[in-house]
Amino acid sequence: MTFLQVENLITRYQTSRGLVHALDDVSFSLEKGDSIGIAGESACGKSTLGLSLIRMIQGGKIVSGKIIFDGESILDLTESEFDKKYRWKKTSMIFQGAMNTLDPVYSIKQQFVEVLNQHNFEGDYERVILDAVHSVNLDENVLQKYPHELSGGMKQRIIIAMALLLKPKFVIADEPTTALDVLIQAQIVNLLKKLKKDGMSIMLITHDLGVLSELADKIGIMYAGKMIEYGTSHDIYKNPKHPYTQGLLESIPTLHGGKPKFIKGNPPDLVNPKQGCRFIDRCPEAMEKCKQDPPKFKTDSGYVMCWLYDDKV
């Protein structure tokens, strides 16, 4: 059963230089209980996609497209309706660098209470807070502590617990393991695996393809505002089709193999992107046809936006 359907999503930011084409014609779907990984280099649109799904775009707006969540078009709802019915109740987000945003002058419990107040929760505060803390494998005595008394891993788990307070069906995790040491990263990944096993749908946004390999059922590869390849985790890792996806995978160091490769050049200017494939200036397979915008060629489990696969997939 399709749980989340995103169709031709376009999001723009207004800047002094003009409109930034942050998301351009992004489409994908997610089954209930499945997880999706969104990967790509910095400023490719990963975080903007997550913020678009939770309708929290600051300094920009969703221009067009559809977001069908559990059978309902959430872009047709007013801000008040979406906030009352969906935000933090059915879908929530673990923001990038979130563990550094805890208020240093309030206890952890006070900050949990503030989240519940903000979303007009009318149930048993104590029970909901304790359930959330226990769900991330923390003892309830952490509630009396202040952020400076917690380790980085504990603070990150607190932020995840806040996202789980109202038991949403879908959680967007934006770089939840960034700036954590390897041991803590493993703890957070294992926690996300547990949440997935318990039936929660997860979107994991990261530049770390190694982390995605452990968690994601589907993977979307972002480049310059476009989702240029989408498919199952197995297909993306074992048979990557887009030259950019291939380059990303070749950049990962391995225990047995040669030196990792890198992708030459820089991403395009998204204020005034050229017509055609946005990877053309960095692509080793570029050809004349690439000066035209590539459509989405169907693959076994998704699609790829690359002229190499015209009439081939």
Image: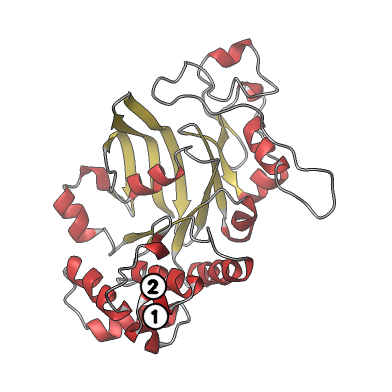
Residue ID at (30%, 30%): 15
Q: Amino acid at mark 1?
A: Val
Where disc 2 sits, the SS reads helix
| Res. 242 visible in picture | no
Question: Compared to 32, does 297 lie above or below?
Answer: above
Q: Of 159 and 90, which appears nearest the observer?
A: 159
Q: Amino acid at mark 2?
A: Ala
Q: Of 71 and 192, which appears nearest the observer?
A: 192
* Residue 286, x across and y down, in percent: 65, 18
Dot 1 and dot 2 residues touching (CB under 8 Å): yes
| Disc sitting over residue 161 in the figure | 2
Question: Compared to 22, does 102 lie above or below?
Answer: below
Quickly name the residue at label 1. Answer: 133
Describe residue 82's horizontal placement relative to residue 257 as left or right. Answer: left
Describe residue 212's horizontal placement relative to residue 174 as left or right. Answer: right
Q: Quadrant of the C terminus?
A: top right
Residue ID at (50%, 19%): 293
* Residue 254, x across and y down, in percent: 78, 52
Q: Quadrant of the N terminus?
A: bottom left
